[in-house]
C-alpha cells in the first residue's frame, strides 16, 4: 500500500510592511511586497502541479481566502519557527500522513519536481532536507515525528542545517539531501536569483 503523502507550505501572510522586512530595508516596502507576492505565486504553481500528494497551507497570522483556495488552511501555532513547524508536523502525523515534507514561500526556483524528490527520499530515509545557500534549509521532511529537529536550534543562522544533521546522525537517523536552492531574504539574494530580470524589468 502506498504511503499517504502530504506537503506543508509555511506562508507569511502578504501584508504590506510585514513581508520580506530585510529586503524592504534596501528596496522599500512596496517593492519587497511585490517580490513576496511573486514568490507566493511561484510556490502556488509548484503545489498545483503535485500528484498523489495532499497540500496543507499554514499561514502566519490568519487564513487567506484569496490564495490556495482549494486546499486546507491552518494558522501556525507557536512562539518560534521550531514550535510552529513542530506543531504542523505533529498535527499532520495525527491525521494519518506517513511521508510529510514542508517548504517555505520565498523560493524562486521551487518546483513540483523538487518537492517530489523530497518526498521520494522518505521511501528510504527517516528525514530529508533541501539545503539553502545561507546554511539553513528550504525543505524539511520526515516519516515519523522527530522532535529533536525542532528543539534548541539556532534558527535563522548559517549553522542551522549542520547542527541539525549532526544531531540526527548522533541519534542514528538516516537523512536524505536534495539540491541546494537560494531563498530570497536580502537584495543580494534577489539580484543573485532567477528573479533578477523579472525584478529589474518592473522597476
Image: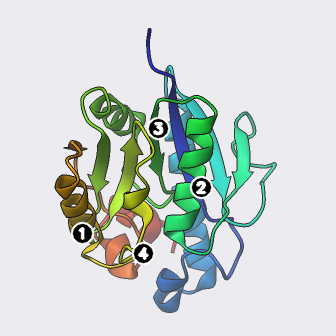
Evaluate if marks 1 and 2 touch, with contact meaning CB atoms under 8 Å apart: no
Mark 2 neighbour class, 10 Å CA radius: few under 14, some 14 to 19, many 20 or more: some
Location of residue 75 in the rendering, given as x and y in whole percent from the top left corner: 72, 57
Quadrant of residue 20 within the rendered picture = bottom right
Please name the residue shown 42% across and 39% down the image.
144
Distance between the alpha carbons at the discs numbered 1 and 4 = 21 Å
Distance between the alpha carbons at the discs numbered 3 and 4 = 25 Å
Q: Nearer the viewer, residue 145 or 48?
A: 145
Mark 1 neighbour class, 10 Å CA radius: few under 14, some 14 to 19, many 20 or more: some
Q: What secondary structure is found at the residue carrying circle 2?
A: helix
Quadrant of residue 198 within the rendered picture = bottom left
Give the labeled residue for mark 1.
163
Q: Earlier in the sequence, mark 1 or mark 3?
A: 3
Distance between the alpha carbons at the discs numbered 3 and 2 = 13 Å
Please name the residue shown 39% across and 77% down the image.
156
Q: Residue furthest right?
A: 65
Left or right side of 21 for 185: left
Please name the residue shown 18% across and 54% down the image.
169
Give the labeled residue for mark 4.
185
Q: How many marks?
A: 4
Please name the residue shown 18% across and 57% down the image.
170
Q: Earlier in the sequence, mark 1 or mark 2?
A: 2
Nearer the observer: mark 2 or 4; the answer is 2
Give the labeled residue for mark 2.
87
Q: What secondary structure is found at the residue carrying circle 3?
A: strand
Amino acid at each position: 500500500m502506498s504511503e499517504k503523502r502530504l506537503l506543508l507550505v509555511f506562508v507569511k501572510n502578504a501584508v504590506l510592511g510585514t513581508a520580506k522586512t530585510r529586503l524592504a530595508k534596501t528596496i522599500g516596502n512596496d517593492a519587497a511586497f511585490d517580490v513576496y507576492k511573486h514568490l507566493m505565486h511561484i510556490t502556488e504553481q509548484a503545489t498545483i502541479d503535485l500528484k498523489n500528494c495532499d497540500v496543507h497551507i499554514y499561514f502566519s497570522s490568519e487564513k487567506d481566502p484569496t490564495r490556495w483556495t482549494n486546499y486546507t488552511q491552518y494558522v501556525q501555532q507557536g512562539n518560534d519557527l521550531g514550535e510552529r513547524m513542530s506543531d504542523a508536523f505533529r498535527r499532520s502525523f495525527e491525521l494519518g500522513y506517513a511521508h510529510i515534507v514542508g517548504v517555505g514561500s520565498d523560493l524562486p526556483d521551487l518546483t513540483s519536481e523538487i518537492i517530489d524528490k523530497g518526498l521520494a527520499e522518505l521511501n528510504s530515509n527517516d528525514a530529508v532536507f533541501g539545503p539553502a545557500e545561507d546554511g539553513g534549509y528550504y525543505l524539511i521532511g520526515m516519516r515519523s515525528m522527530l522532535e529533536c529537529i525542532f528543539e534548541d536550534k539556532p534558527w535563522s543562522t548559517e549553522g542551522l542545517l549542520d547542527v541539525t544533521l549532526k544531531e540526527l546522525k548522533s541519534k542514528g537517523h538516516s537523512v536524505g539531501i536534495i539540491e541546494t536552492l537560494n531563498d530570497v531574504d536580502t537584495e543580494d539574494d534577489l539580484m543573485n536569483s532567477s528573479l533578477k530580470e523579472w525584478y529589474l524589468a518592473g522597476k
